[in-house]
Image: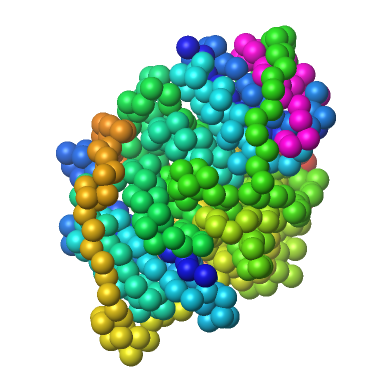
Amino acid sequence: MKILVAVKRVIDYNVQIRVKEDGSGVVTDNVKMSTNPPDDNAIEEAVKIKEAGKASEIIAISVGDEKAQETVRKALAVGADKGILVKADGIIEPLAVSKILKKIVEKEKPDLVFMGKQAIDDDCNQTGQMLAALLNWPQATFASKIEVKEKSLEVTREIDEGLETLEVNIPAIVTCDLRLNEPRYASLPNIMKAKKKPIEQINASDLGVDTKPRIEQIKVEEPPKRKAGIKVASVEELVHKLKNEAKVI
Amino acid sequence: MSVLLIAEHNNKDIKPFTFNAISAASKINEDVHVLVLGSNSDSVAKSISEVPNVKKVIHINNEIYENYLAENYTSVITKLSSSYSHIICSANTFGKNLMPRIAALLDVSQVSDIIKVISEDTFLRPIYAGNAFATVKSNDKIKCVTVRPTSFDPAPTSGGSAEIQNGDPGDATQLSKFVKKEEIKSDRPELGTARIVVSGGRGMQSGENFKLITAVADKLNAAIGASRAAVDAGYITNDHQVGQTGKVVVPDLYIAIGISGAIQHLAGMKESKVIVAINKDGEAPIFSVADYGLEADLFDALPKFLEELNKLNTIQK
């Protein structure tokens, strides 16, 4: 069984982002970048399945500019066997990414595609479901547990009401939640080995996918700031303020 | 052209966020049609028809809709889509799972999680965990939009009498099947719609200690929330998680206890009207968004807090 894992390079989750003064977006120059956190869970799960002898090959793919290669390289250091970088500049909307991934799926013929449930930059939460639709594959989103069976997966999903379990036939798309597993760190020897693993580079335009954004981003601004609050000295003062000043209890 | 809203329900009751999504849909266009896909779900269709904002209910009753599978929903919705300018649902786990599957088949770039309708094609949405707001304009012929429910007031539930039209089901998927749902039932207000939320974080130190939070929540008739750290540590189940990848809440009062206030947690609660933080680390980022901060050991403060609440003659419900 072959697993394709899609990873995205995003601003590191610990960085306090800054909005550009001209309203055209957020500052990304000289900002720490990392793998989108739930994409780390997606890679980890694929590696665990391979370690359990249920998968033979893991391909890591990223769509983005030249630097997205680092994100693919990190996936290789954690256990992916080969990498693909589809080069595209500017904002690539989830619809375009899913069309690119469809082309790669048709070429590489994986049995499963894993990715994080949501990218922490645009917060869209779309790509996996869109790819599933375009391929007419079943989807299991927000996965917190995956059990590989002979011709299907049993996936536990985190939903608003609690947990739901679905059985999806293989081939399938799974989008991963942060509680699916604990992503491992790449060891130094594995980082060195990853440097020798192949990364195939493809231009998005060569795949015949139109990546022009459909959505116009008119402006990006800072959200309204909250008024500074106060520190209270005691529980009594807190309750008094909530009752008589804020009037919420 | 009209707007098609996809209802979320359990064949018996309508999920509350459907009403928030209806109110967002009415801001786009007053001609709101609601699609109810269900099995033995007549009562749901009838209740929706009583929402004054709703002009028509399309009810498709078939056993393939007994449990919600995005694959089954998608085939019928894409068939109906040609008569509509917009397809809308809530940006909760129901709508997030469903809408992109519809959008991709219609070759539409979806607009996720809007918090404001600026015009019928332009919307405001948070990005980067709510640390920036983007104004975006959709140029697709049909617009697929998910709505952050807590940013819109729920539509009134009675006084209307929309026509209920029965429709034919779409194809049933052979690709996936529902196995089970483990729903956590509680008599408390729902986290997403509660007036008061009391949340615990890693500072609670154990699941057992959450009983301190439960006692305060009982007193205030509040829902119980949690940070991701508390859920990851197994103190409480995932349905309580507030944050960028959990639930977004906007209560009148949010009480954060033993929560440091990572960006990802703030994303889920910083629009609350009044925020209280109780934390022994005076430098914790949660204090930067708190209206009232109490720097104290929560194990001393919580019992005292409950005692003080008990002294009050009245507590708002």
Query: How is the model colour-coded?
Result: rainbow
Residue A249 appears left or right of A57: right
Where B257 falls versus B86 (above or below)? below
Can the viewer see residue A223? Answer: no
Q: Residue B271's spot in the image, x, y percent?
A: 48, 41
Q: Residue at x 63, y 21 (%)?
A: B34
Q: Residue at x 67, y 46 (%)?
A: B174
Q: Quadrant of the C terminus of chain A?
A: top right
Where B105 falls versus B295 (above or below)? above
Can the viewer see residue B57? Answer: yes
Residue B301 appears left or right of A231: right
- What segment carries the magenta color? B43-65
Q: Residue B197's spot in the image, x, y percent?
A: 64, 47
Residue B69 on the magenta span: no
Which of the 4 quarters of the picture holds residue B150? Answer: top right
Residue B49 on the magenta span: yes
- Residue furthest bottom in the image: A189
Front position in the image: B43 or A106: A106
Q: Residue A143's spot in the image, x, y percent?
A: 58, 59
Q: Residue A102's spot in the image, x, y percent?
A: 40, 50
Where B44 falls versus B315 (above or below)? above
Number of marks present in the image shown: 0
Q: Residue at x 41, y 78 (%)?
A: A79
Q: Residue at x 58, y 80 (%)?
A: A52
Front position in the image: A162 or B102: B102
